[in-house]
Each structure stands twice: as structure tokens, then as C-alpha cells.
Amino acid sequence: MPLNRILVADDEESIRWVLSKALKQKGFTVDIAHDGRQALELIKDNCYDLAILDIKMPGINGLDLLDKVREMNSDLLMVIMTAEASMKNAVEAMKRGAYDYITKPFDLDVIDAIIEKVARARDIAVQVTSLKEELKGRYQVEKNIVGNSVAMQEVYKTIGKVAGSDVTILIQGESGTGKELVARAVHFNSERIGKPFIAINCAAIPRDLLESELFGLEKGSFTGAGERKLGKFEQANHGTLFLDEIGDMPLELQAKILRVLQEHEVTRIGGNQNISVNVRIVAATNQSLIEKVRAKDFREDLYYRLNVVPITLAPLRDRRDDIPDLANYLLSRACAEMSVSPKQLSADALTLLNSYSWPGNVRELENAIKRAVILSNDPLLTAADFGGLLSTKETPQSGAQETSLEELVDLKLRSSMNGIEGLEKGDIFAMVLEQVERPLIRLILEKCRWNQVKAADVLGINRNTLRKKISELNIEIKRG
């Protein structure tokens, strides 16, 4: 965006004349002021791209003029001229908002360089503003978090109230309810838009690596640390750090997180330097942190530091009115992402989706729709397209009595073991046990996001026993 109009303010007529002539020859429109008061009135009445101001002028000096222009919330770029090349003048001018300063006498080449610098700065500012608007549009709440239920309306209100501040937020809800989406909506509707949004899943990273991921490490801090590594706090500086599944964070790390919230400083592993960080914390959990506090598994002081503003996301089964809008939105997005011709949901498909319990919440609904889009060649998705993807036995509204796990196993065994005469002694128990153990352990590992310590606790077995079973049953371990 090229510069067009420039203001020159100086009580020396020779300076005004030289600058005005030189700038006009380069095609700029130039206004001149002989003192600070006239310059202020011109700035109030006109739109300038740049103002070149003398530091010493009658009425209002250049430094005071900087203050008054800033009070007007003007984004005018101002350059201060001074005949005294002192550090005090330079520091004071920059503190009060000057873009740059030059000392008299000066060559016109210096003015040319300043103008080029200002032009580049304006271009960058325009690009940043455009990017911020693009990001804000991309993460507008109404475009990305779908639902008009009472529960979701409360979430929208809370996001609107807290986005502009820097208060710490704790988002609570079952897996798949969209906690990270809410965190992003808070960030991209705040003053920190354009700054980093860094997310880390505290349950997906082994506890012996989580500390270095968060706080970073210095070169040589331990064997294999060949270079300095910045942690997530430093990466998120001036932006937002999203701590997902914070309920799984080890107690010893919780104390360090509390210190960062209190002191706004981090220390890398192996280092002794305190590094200041300006980070907004948004935490999330699918667990009851207050219950973990009572069980001494979560620090009470950290809980209250995080829970300044709580946002609770209701499970999808408790806001069924949102399912039709959500399903249609996710269907439209899935078709666009997969470059598939637009599809629609039939009435019976919506009825089926609305009756299902959705234990995996919005994430499960999204995956079911994506699979249906991939597997169906028809423009209209019917209940049949979802029949094999959903288990209607999980539907809480069904009038039929739910079949127990024991009954299902009994039915499966009776149907698959018609010819047990060929089995040798001892084979049946080992075979059945292996076929039950493998899917059970794999399921629990998936639910625990492949955290073996947590999975062993859920299963009620020793961690070493779990490792042995994983090896014996050839269960493929995934990360995250």
C-alpha cells in the first residue's frame, strides 16, 4: 500500500521548504505546519500516511504531540527530527510511540530510506490485519461450533464474555465434545489472534517426556540432548497454550505448571535461566478434576488457578436438538473435504442419527458421516447407509431390553463352536480367552489414548502384566 500524504512539522522554515520540495518531487502530497498546535489540528482534520515532526516546536513540542496523537487512537506513523543526537531523546521518542527518529543535519537519502521503511511497515500491517480478519472469520463461533440448544447458547455467551480478556479457562466435557474447537474459538476471537495457538495432549505423551515438551531443554542436559529445544510455553509466547486432558498430568509437573501461572516464567530442563513468558492458558479435561482433587491425584491450588472461568460441554445425547443441524453441517464439510458431489440426509437417516446414544459424541458423528459419504454412491444418504456403522443397541430410547455382554458371548460361542469334537484338551479355554482379551485390551488402550499406565489402572492389572499381554497377543501400539 503506497504512501500518499505526508505532514512535515518544524518551526524552521528552511527545513519545511527542503523537505516539502523533495517529497513533492517524488509525487507525495505534502502539508506543512510551523508549530505543534497547527500540526495537531491538521492531524485531526486529515488522514496522513506519515508525519515528520521536529522534537522542539513552539506550543506543543514533538514528544507531547506524540502523546496527543496516540490518545486519539491514531495508527499514524510518526518520525521525530532532533538536533540533539542524545540517547535520552532517542529513547524517549521511541517510548512515546515514534516509528523512528533522525538527527539534524541529515541527507535526503536518509529521508528516502525512512519512507521505504515506513512503506514496508504499512504493507506488513495491512497483511497482518487481513490475516487476522481471515482467521477470525475461519474461527467464528457460529461457523465452527454448531448447535442452538440451551446448553450451547450458554457456551457461546461465555466465549463472547471471556475471549477479550486473559483469564484462564477450564473446558470440561466427554471425549469428542469439541473442547479444542472451543479453545480455538476463544483464541481466534481474542486480542491474541495472529499469535501462536499451541495445543498439547497431556495424556498422549509419556510422562518422562512431557516435562521437556512443555518447558524445553538445554543442549547437553542429558544424554542425547544434542541441541537446545524450546518448550510449548515458549512456542506459545504472546499466544494461547491449550493443555488438553490436563487431568492426566503427573503431580510433579502440576507444581511446575502452577509456578508458571504464578510467576509467568519457565526454566528449561538443564538450564538455570528464568525465561519470561506471556501465555494465556486454556485447559481441558474429560474427567472430574474435583474428584481427582479429593483423591489427591490433582493439586487443589492448581485446580482453582485453572478453573477461573469454567466452560462445560454437554454430551451429544443431552442435546439431541442439535443433531440434525450438526449432521447436515458435517455432511456438507465432509463432501467438500473429499471433493465429493453434495449429498443429503434422508428423513429416516436423521431419525436413526437422532436416536443413537453417541458415546463418542460429535467426533463419532463426524466419523460416521465420513464413512457413509465414502461408502455410498447415492446423493441421498438413508438409514441403510448408517446401519452397519452404528449399534442401535446403544440407543437409550430403545424400548427393547439391552442384551448383556455375557448373553452376547454365549450366543457367539454357541454359533461358532458346533464342532468341538476336533478340539484337543485345553484348547477351548485358551482360544476363547485370547479372542476376548485381545479386543478388550485394545479397546481400553484406545480409550486411554494408548497410555499404558492408565490402561493398566482401568483394567485392574499390573503394568508389567499389560506389557506382557500386549506382546503375547501381538497388539499393535499406536501413539496419540
Image (spheres, helix red, strand yellow):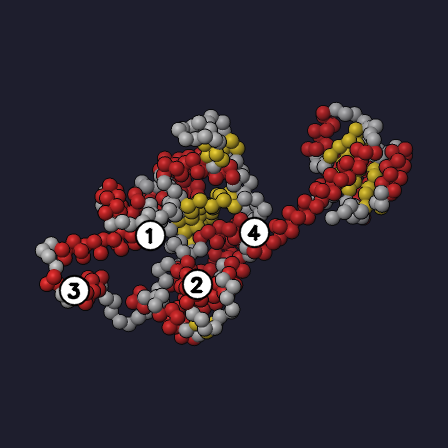
- How far apart, in angstroms, are the residues tagged by discs 2 and 4? 29 Å
First in sequence, mark 2 or 4: give its number: 4
- Between label 3 and label 4, give the one nearer the viewer: 3
Depth check, front residue: 195 or 117: 117
Which secondary structure lies at badge 1? helix
> How far apart are the alpha carbons under marks 2 and 3?
36 Å
Please give the residue where the numbered disc 3 appears in the rendered image. Answer: 417
The disc placed on residue 189 is 4
Residue plotted at (46% across, 34% down): 216
User: Residue 79 location, x and y as percent?
Assistant: 76, 36
Label ID, residue 291: none
Separation of residues labelled 3 and 1 (CA atoms): 31 Å
Q: Nearer the viewer, residue 153 or 443?
A: 443
Q: Can you give x and y, in whole percent of width and height, for residue 102 in the image? A: 77, 31
Pointer 1: what residue?
Answer: 447
Residue 383 figure quarter: bottom left
